[in-house]
Amino acid sequence: MNITPYIFQPEKSIEVYKKTSEYLLENPNIKEKIEELGWFYHIIGMTIPQNWDNFWSGHIFPFSESWEELQISFNLVCFGLYKQAFVSLRSALELGMLSVYYNINDEGHKIVQDWLSSKDSNDANTPRAGTIWKVLLSNDNIQKFNEEHNLKKRFEELGFLHNYVHTKGNKYSNKLGRLKSNSQTFEPDLIDSWLNTYEKIASIVCSLHLLKYPIAVVKYDYSRKFGIDIPSFGGLETFNIEKIGKILPKHYLESIEKIAETDISTQETIKEIKSFPDKTEEEVEEQVLFIEKLTIEGCGFKKWLEQQNDLLKLFNEKEFSEVMINRIEVLKKWSIDNDYYDKTKLDKYKKKKESE
């Protein structure tokens, strides 16, 4: 659909998208890098503790919004809206830093409320970069790391993103690109520039979160103590720490690991966790059964069993393990006893309402 007199037409963005897709398929290393950064950023969000005091409080909103801005930025790149993609990158950086800013003293669930509610007051305004850094550097870990690696300077080097927001002349305008006409064009150089900037932003935001929550870099098998129900206290599983290590500069991670070794809160938490008794196989199986029962309540046993068979095929397995066979029998009996064999909780609720 074309609507005059508009030159920036959706069809042209679709043309750019097709060229972008071809470019990424022809350059799998770039596609893989975008995927790696996405998972990398997703993992960062796991470092933010969640408990009954702050769950649904909005303390994690700055980070989740930052992650959404990165996803939107990628979409804008795909459709040739490069200036807007860089604007979203700037928002992602700012929001990622705000995530640590508001939670710097673990009071984010309270402090974030006015800003989260978009109140019309100065206190509710998004703070300027100088204010954000003043608060961030009040944290001993961040201050120590900044003295060694000058993280604030890395942030300042991204100051050019501000120019896209306020359109500082031709270079930062919608005319961005070597092949630029007066509408959307495919610009591989700008994709490379965007990806390079994305990685720098992810590195800064990740470093700040790891410094605020250094327990995230401690390698420990938390499943020994918690089974499959590991609480969201900020600890990461080893394979996720290793994923971070592939993106974050090596010397960054090494410095944060050293900080974690002397961080009092981190060491006290790890000591407490290690004091817990190990979960037995029976206890872990009870956790699994509890989760599976909730799933069955939502879809019924027959549908659940179909899903398990689909997973079996997906992983190229010929038959269920003995543990899984026993689990199926237990859940089948429970489903029949509780009328969930071919019904869901919603089905039962509807039937009850109809009979009233």
Image (tube, rainbow, N blue to C red):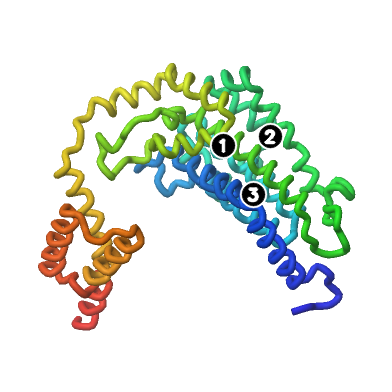
Q: Is residue 28 visible?
A: yes
Residue drawn at the location 21% of the way across and 75% of the way down: 342
Q: Earlier in the sequence, mark 1 or mark 3?
A: 3
Three-letter amino acid code at the position of disc 3: Ile
Q: Residues within 10 Å of mark 2 (few under 14, many from 20)?
A: few
Does the residue at mark 2 contact the one at mark 3 (Cβ under 8 Å)? no
- Residue at disc 3, secondary structure: helix
Q: Quadrant of the N terminus?
A: bottom right
Image vertical order of residue 310 relative to residue 197, above or below: below
Counting from the top left corner in percent of width and height, residue 108 is at 49, 38
What is the distance, in whole Å, between disc 2 and disc 1 at their CAs?
25 Å
- Residue at disc 1, secondary structure: helix
Three-letter amino acid code at the position of disc 1: Ile
Residue drawn at the location 39% of the way across and 24% of the way down: 266
Q: Is residue 116 visible?
A: no
Counting from the top left corner in percent of width and height, residue 250 is at 56, 27
Q: Quadrant of the C terminus?
A: bottom left
Q: Considering depth in this image, is 41 or 306 the residue closer to the camera?
A: 306
Q: Considering depth in this image, is 39 or 97 the residue closer to the camera?
A: 39
Q: Earlier in the sequence, mark 2 or mark 3?
A: 3
Counting from the top left corner in percent of width and height, residue 257 is at 47, 23
Three-letter amino acid code at the position of disc 2: Ala
What is the distance, in whole Å, between disc 2 and disc 3 at their CAs?
31 Å
Q: Which mark is residue 247?
A: 1
Residue identified by numbered label 3: 30
Residue drawn at the location 49% of the way across and 39% of the way down: 243
Residue identified by numbered label 2: 129
What is the distance, in whole Å, between disc 1 and disc 3 at their CAs?
14 Å
